[in-house]
């Protein structure tokens, strides 16, 4: 019989009991961060809050926020709560200025992560009988290893395909009889396309479940993936600062993503004022970790815009559901699963000696792959009457950008004052992809 | 050798409809005459190189009109308009191992002379080599008289 829950007792826990558990863990987590993470203690002292002030779950609102800049300022290990002898894993993601955001995990953190990711796989309809192909990149990015540990913890047979070499991915799925695919949604479509080109009929394969995440996608795209791969695609949410993939998943209802509240407290705040908003209202999603040791997080601002609901879900899980991501309240772009900040482009242009770095990013989706074009206004100091020189300049900018951003791009030199401007300021980004419904 | 080069005006243009016409309009309104024109094009952009009667004024008006413009030193040699003229010039440069970036040519008003515009790596050295071989480089004033 198909397994319905990984951990029924906790996934379907009575909300009152859940809140009791949360409060107990929140008190521990705040005390732990205060005692072990210098920058947290400092932040709390600055606003005059002590761990003892947390008496109810509502008191969470008294605590300071954590933002990506805090993590950058304490690069690389300044916010680790555990000594290096207890850290067993380090992951990193790209930051706003080229410096990565580094996170550490203790053995217990990895166990929790595996448990939560396993819950996600089960909620998506997988169990120990499945063959799970993990086609997220393995490495500093949390996607590959996060999904891997979750599927292995579940007891499924894991195929650690990692990203790239799509024809091989398609062959593995076919030959191994893979039943569950985990990757980014755009890569899932790319695999579907490749299968079609190779003459592999996905409808005839045992493949039946998709666990896709690390980038925003629409219901329309989900339907497209369902249709082309003949599967049921699920949305898995996570970010390395909070843990990695497995923070939340949509169950068989596919109507919102359950956030595992026994380990994280989500809040929706007004991104302008920081005020906590009630269930149902749209705002910025934050996470507070309740059990994390490696790098505890207090009210981490995801800059993702969504809303929360505790309406009972027919699946029986009582954990709060978040809606699809509706957008971002900062300028971060996710291109092929990689975080890109427009300001990174500026730093590259300044480095190569452009006096007024005027640039414009055009993100598009050609077929199923994201493309990035960086248009750069050419200034007198960059201009030459020799084609060779301009082409060299173009290649240099592209290589610098690709090195820093971690995604390939096309650079186009354009005439001055031709980039789109709004009230005198250059519009930095045109995102032609339809990522949000 | 001083002053024997001429000023070429170079303009950066995106490959967009009507841009070259705008350059021509800008110069026309300033009453500047184009003597020679050469466009180097790539997939995304082009570089327009112009020999005009009043390069300084052309530079100013193009700048004012918002074009990315530069003034470059190039060599203009006046040769009889007959077979072998360009070969002679190029052989001089080759003998001295001077790299040619690009070249274009136009015919003088009387139809007796061809003007070759040469962009080389080292202008001074090229001028010297040409002079040694009795090839005459002209300056902007002489160009005006042609």
Image (cartoon, coloured by chain):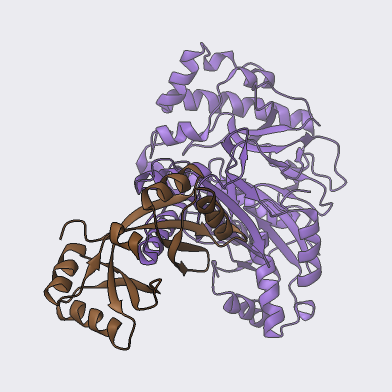
Q: Nearer the viewer, residue B145 or B45?
A: B145
From the top left corner, tell me how far across and down residue B93 is, in percent: 20, 77
Drawn colour of chain A?
purple
Q: For this view, does B123 lie left or right of residue A339?
A: left
Taking the view exactly as shown, the residue that stands out farthest to the bottom is B83
Q: Nearer the viewer, residue B139 or A116?
A: B139
Drawn colour of chain B?
brown
Taking the view exactly as shown, the residue that stands out farthest to the right is A314
Can you say whether B128 is above or below A90 in the image? below
Task: Let me know if residue A106 appears in the view.
Answer: no
Q: Residue at x 44, y 56 (%)?
A: B11
Instruction: Name the quadrant containing residue B97.
Output: bottom left
Quadrant including the N terminus of chain A? bottom right
Q: Nearer the viewer, residue A107 or A40?
A: A40
Q: Tag count in the figure?
A: 0
From the top left corner, tell me how far across and down residue B63 is, in percent: 45, 45
Q: Residue at x 81, y 52 (%)?
A: A254
Q: For this view, does B46 lie left or right of residue B105?
A: right
């Amino acid at each position: 019989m198909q397994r319905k829950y990984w951990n029924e007792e906790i996934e379907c826990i009575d909300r009152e009991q859940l809140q009791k558990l949360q409060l107990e863990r929140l008190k521990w987590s705040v005390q732990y961060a205060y005692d072990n993470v210098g920058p947290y203690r400092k932040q709390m002292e600055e606003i005059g809050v002590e761990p003892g002030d947390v008496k109810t779950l509502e008191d969470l609102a008294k605590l300071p926020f954590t933002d990506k800049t805090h993590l950058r300022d304490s690069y690389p290990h300044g916010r680790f709560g555990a000594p290096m002898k207890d850290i067993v894993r380090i992951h990193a993601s790209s930051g706003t200025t080229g410096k990565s955001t580094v996170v550490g995990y203790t053995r217990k953190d990895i166990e929790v992560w595996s448990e939560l990711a396993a819950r996600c796989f089960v909620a998506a309809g997988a169990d120990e009988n499945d063959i799970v192909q993990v086609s997220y990149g393995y490495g500093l990015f949390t996607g590959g290893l996060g999904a891997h540990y979750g599927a292995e913890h579940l007891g499924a047979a894991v195929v650690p395909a990692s990203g790239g070499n799509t024809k091989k991915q398609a062959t593995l799925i076919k030959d191994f009889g893979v039943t569950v695919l985990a990757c980014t949604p755009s890569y899932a479509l790319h695999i579907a396309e490749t299968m079609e080109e190779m003459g592999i009929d996905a409808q005839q394969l045992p493949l039946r479940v998709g666990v896709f995440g690390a980038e925003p996608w629409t219901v329309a795209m989900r339907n497209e993936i369902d249709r082309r791969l003949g599967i049921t695609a699920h949305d898995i949410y996570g970010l390395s600062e909070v843990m990695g993939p497995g923070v939340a998943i949509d169950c068989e209802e596919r109507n919102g993503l359950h956030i595992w509240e026994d380990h994280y407290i989500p809040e929706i705040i007004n991104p302008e004022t920081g005020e906590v908003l009630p269930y149902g209202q749209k705002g910025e999603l934050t996470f507070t970790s309740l059990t994390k040791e490696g790098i505890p997080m207090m009210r981490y601002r995801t800059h993702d815009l969504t809303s929360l609901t505790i309406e009972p879900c027919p699946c029986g899980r009582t954990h709060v559901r978040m809606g699809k991501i509706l957008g971002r309240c900062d300028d971060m772009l996710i291109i092929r699963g990689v975080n890109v900040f427009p300001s990174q482009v500026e730093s590259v242009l300044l480095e190569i000696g452009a006096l007024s770095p005027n640039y414009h990013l055009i993100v598009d989706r050609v077929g199923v792959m994201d493309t990035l074009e960086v248009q750069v206004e050419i200034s007198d100091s960059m201009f030459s009457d020799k084609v060779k020189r301009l082409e060299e300049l173009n290649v240099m900018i592209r290589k610098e950008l690709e090195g820093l951003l971690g995604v390939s791009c096309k650079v186009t030199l354009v005439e001055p004052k031709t980039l789109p401007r709004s009230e005198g300021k250059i519009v930095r980004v045109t995102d032609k992809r339809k990522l949000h419904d | 050798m001083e002053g024997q080069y001429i000023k070429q005006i170079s303009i950066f243009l995106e490959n967009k409809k009507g841009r070259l016409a705008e350059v021509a309009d800008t110069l026309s309104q300033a009453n500047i005459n184009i003597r020679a024109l050469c466009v180097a094009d790539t997939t995304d952009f082009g570089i327009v190189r112009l020999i005009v009667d009043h390069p300084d004024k052309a530079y100013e008006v193009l700048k004012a009109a918002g074009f990315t413009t530069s003034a470059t030193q190039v060599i203009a040699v006046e040769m009889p308009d007959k077979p072998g003229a360009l070969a002679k010039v190029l052989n001089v440069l080759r003998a001295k191992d001077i790299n040619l970036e690009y070249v274009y040519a136009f015919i003088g008003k009387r139809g007796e002379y061809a003007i070759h515009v040469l962009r080389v790596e080292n202008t001074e050295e090229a001028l010297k080599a040409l002079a040694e071989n009795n090839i005459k480089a002209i300056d902007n004033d002489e160009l005006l008289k042609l």
